[in-house]
Amino acid sequence: MRIGFGSDHAAVDMKAILMEHLAEQGHECVDFGPESAEQRTDYPDKALEVAEAVKTGEIDKGVLCCGTGIGMALAANKVPGIRASVCGDPFSAEMTVRHNNANIITIGARVVGSELAKMIVDSFFNAEFEGGRHARRVDKITAIEEKYSKG
Ligand code: RB5
C-alpha cells in the first residue's frame, strides 16, 4: 500500500518511527514532512496535504500525527471523502476500517507510546472494510458532506 505521512512539530519522531515500521512491512511510505521538530508546523496544513493526496489517489491511505491526534482528525475530516479517525488502541484502529472505511488514521504522540502506536497502525492496515450494512452507514456520512457542500 502507498501510505502518506504527515505531522506537526510535536510528532516528528512518532512519524519517523511509524514510517520505518510500515516500510519494513513492504509498504511504500511517502513523507509529507516536516523533516524536524525545529520546523514549527501547524497541524491543519499537513492534514490538508495528506487528505488531498488521499482524495486524488496519489496515496492510498494516510497516517497523521500531532500531540493528541485530535487536531489532525478534525482538519482532515473537512476534506470531502476523508474519514480520519483518532485512535489510541488497536481495537478502535481495526474497527474504524472494518465499519467506517477510514482512510486516514491519526495518532497522538503525547498520548500513546511508540510500541503501542506500532500495534495501532498494524491493526489499521491489516483490516478490511466489511461493506454491507456498514456501507449504507458510510454512505450516510457522505450524504451529510454533500448536503453541506452545496453552499
Ligand atoms: C501542538 O502544540 C498541539 O496543539 C498539536 O500537536 C495537537 O495536539 C493538536 O490537536
Image: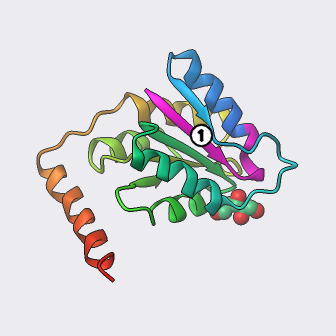
Is residue 88 left or right of 131 when viewed as pictured?
right
Closer to us: 127 or 82: 82
Question: Is 27 placed above or below 77 here?
Answer: above
Closer to us: 123 or 43: 43
Disc 1: CA contacts within 10 A as few (<14), some (14-19) or many (>=20)? many
Looking at the figure, which quarter contains the C terminus? bottom left
Is residue 86 left or right of 5 when viewed as pictured?
left
Question: Is 145 placed above or below 128 here?
Answer: below
Looking at the figure, which quarter contains the N terminus? top left
Is residue 146 left or right of 29 when viewed as pictured?
left
Please give the name of the residue rendered at 37% of the width and 62% of the height, measured from the top-left corner.
Answer: 80
Please state the extent of the stretch shown in magenta in the rendering: 1-13
The quarter holding residue 57 reads top left
Q: Check disc 1 and report the residue beneath it.
A: 5
Q: Going by the picture, which residue comes out furthest to the bottom?
A: 151
Callout count: 1
- In the rendered image, residue 103 lying in the magenta stretch gets the answer no
Please give the name of the residue rendered at 43% of the width and 62% of the height, measured from the top-left corner.
Answer: 79
The residue carrying mark 1 has its beta carbon less than 8 Å from ligand 1:
no
Q: Which amino acid does label 1 sit on?
A: Phe
Colouring of the image: rainbow
Residue 113: image x %, image y %?
68, 39
Please give the name of the residue rendered at 57% of the width and 61% of the height, measured from the top-left corner.
Answer: 70
